[in-house]
């Protein structure tokens, strides 16, 4: 391994050379079943024909012009996303952190327009919103923040899934302008709020004149069984942030807004050199069209139910399994002990999985899994967990 890279990752001892669907092959020719999708990025799997064709075609025509000019592919993608999400306008960028930065700036400018000099945004413990200074401050994980002080002011932290705590903030802090929350906390351990949480949060925001901003960077683009996770509860936020699965591996992020929030930004308020290039938008259009035309969000829901049933059978009565949490193909299996070693064991067995929040086995497989591949992934992960807990 080269010494020329900054050691910001403790990389696993494997390098992949090619992929097809849910499978990857390393430099030695060994095949792996991908249960992680590049952390919820390759929702269509690897080397998907529609994305490959779109990227190759566009790379041969036009890659970049800058946002000084109209970009028709960007306009088409904006139309598609606003239609799918029930939103009105989009700002394009390159990552989830950038999308959340845009949302934070939008909320602050919205607050200033209302005459609030020091606007606050409510965020949750256990959240993850990115690693830029503003987004790592919004993130509810001290490990992410440590060493980067002073942090950014203007965030009020509450426990996740705690409406009473948000009500307390409303009574005591009159500078609040928005709530930024993940519908499901991914990095925080695939933690899901109680049914009705988003509906109640929507009502609170309406009551107090706040923006409801949902970080759907990990949950969006069909991952949870709907195109967007908020659609499970029939609510519509004011702002949504997207990235990860939007480009199926090609970097692109988006901040969507509606109503008052859609009117906040004007020329000069925000920008991005590479945001929404023709190449990025071509990839993302192929993704959105494939997800919709092939019905992959409903497919994710049925596959998730199938895998949940298999996990329930395989791990029933196994001491040390705390909870199995499944929403579409966003799966977390919480154990009663740290289990990071499972990642290495899975790699040896030809599986790619992840452990987050120290004790949660996280699976984010591609939405294009076959029934057989879903059964294989659930069966082999169950066996790894049983072996760890009974050794």
Image (spheres, rainbow, N blue to C red):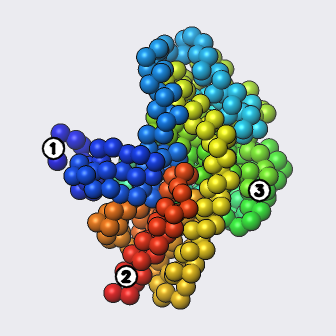
- Mark 3–mark 2 Cα distance, whole angstroms, equals 37 Å
Q: Nearer the viewer, residue 195 or 15?
A: 15
Residue assigned mark 1: 3
Q: Residues within 10 Å of mark 3 (few under 14, many from 20)?
A: few
* Residue 351 image position (x, y, % from top left): 37, 62
In the image, residue 79 sits, relative to residue 390, either above or below, namely above
Q: Earlier in the sequence, mark 3 or mark 2?
A: 3
Q: Earlier in the sequence, mark 2 or mark 1?
A: 1
Q: Secondary structure at mark 1?
A: loop
Q: Earlier in the sequence, mark 3 or mark 1?
A: 1
Residue assigned mark 3: 233
In the image, residue 95 sits, relative to residue 16, either above or below, namely above
* Residue 209 image position (x, y, % from top left): 80, 44
- Mark 3–mark 1 Cα distance, whole angstroms, equals 48 Å
* Residue 122 image position (x, y, % from top left): 64, 51
Depth check, mark 2 against mark 1: the one in front is 2
Image mark for residue 387: 2
Q: Residues within 10 Å of mark 1 (few under 14, many from 20)?
A: few
Name the residue: 65% across, 21% down.
75
- Mark 2–mark 1 Cα distance, whole angstroms, equals 36 Å
Image mark for residue 363: none
Q: Secondary structure at mark 3?
A: loop
């Amino acid at each position: 391994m080269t010494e020329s890279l900054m050691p910001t990752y403790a990389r696993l001892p494997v390098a992949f050379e090619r992929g097809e669907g849910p499978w990857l092959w390393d430099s030695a020719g060994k095949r792996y079943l991908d249960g992680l999708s590049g952390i919820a990025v390759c929702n269509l799997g690897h080397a998907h024909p529609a994305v490959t064709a779109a990227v190759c075609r566009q790379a041969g025509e036009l890659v970049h012009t800058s946002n000084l000019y109209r970009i028709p592919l960007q306009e088409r993608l904006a139309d598609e996303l606003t239609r799918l999400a029930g939103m009105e306008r989009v700002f394009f960028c390159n990552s989830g952190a950038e999308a959340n930065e845009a949302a934070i700036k939008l909320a602050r400018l919205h607050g200033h327009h209302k005459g609030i000099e020091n606007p606050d945004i409510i965020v949750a413990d256990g959240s993850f919103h990115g690693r830029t200074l503003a987004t790592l401050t919004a993130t509810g994980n001290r490990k992410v923040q440590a060493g980067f002080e002073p942090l950014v002011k203007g965030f009020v932290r509450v426990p996740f899934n705690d409406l009473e705590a948000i009500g307390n903030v409303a009574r005591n802090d009159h500078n609040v302008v928005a709530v930024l929350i993940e519908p499901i906390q991914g990095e925080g351990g695939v933690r899901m709020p109680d049914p009705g949480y988003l509906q109640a949060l929507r009502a609170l925001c309406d009551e107090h004149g706040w923006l409801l901003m949902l970080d759907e960077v990990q949950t969006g683009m069909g991952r949870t069984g709907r195109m967007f996770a908020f659609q499970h509860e029939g609510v519509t936020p004011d702002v949504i942030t997207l990235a990860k699965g939007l480009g199926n591996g090609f970097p692109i992020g988006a901040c969507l807004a509606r109503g008052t929030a859609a009117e906040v930004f004007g020329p000069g308020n925000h920008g991005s050199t590479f945001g929404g290039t023709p190449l990025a938008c071509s990839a993302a259009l192929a993704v959105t069209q494939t997800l919709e035309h092939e019905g992959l969000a409903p497919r994710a829901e049925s596959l998730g139910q199938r895998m949940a049933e298999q996990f329930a059978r395989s791990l029933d009565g196994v001491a040390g399994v705390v909870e199995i949490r499944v929403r579409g193909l966003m799966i977390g299996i919480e154990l009663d002990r740290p289990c990071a070693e499972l990642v290495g064991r899975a790699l040896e067995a030809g599986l790619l999985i992840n452990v987050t929040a120290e004790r949660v086995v996280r699976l984010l497989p591609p939405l294009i899994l076959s029934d057989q591949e879903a059964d294989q992934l659930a069966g082999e992960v169950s066996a790894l967990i049983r072996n760890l807990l009974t050794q």
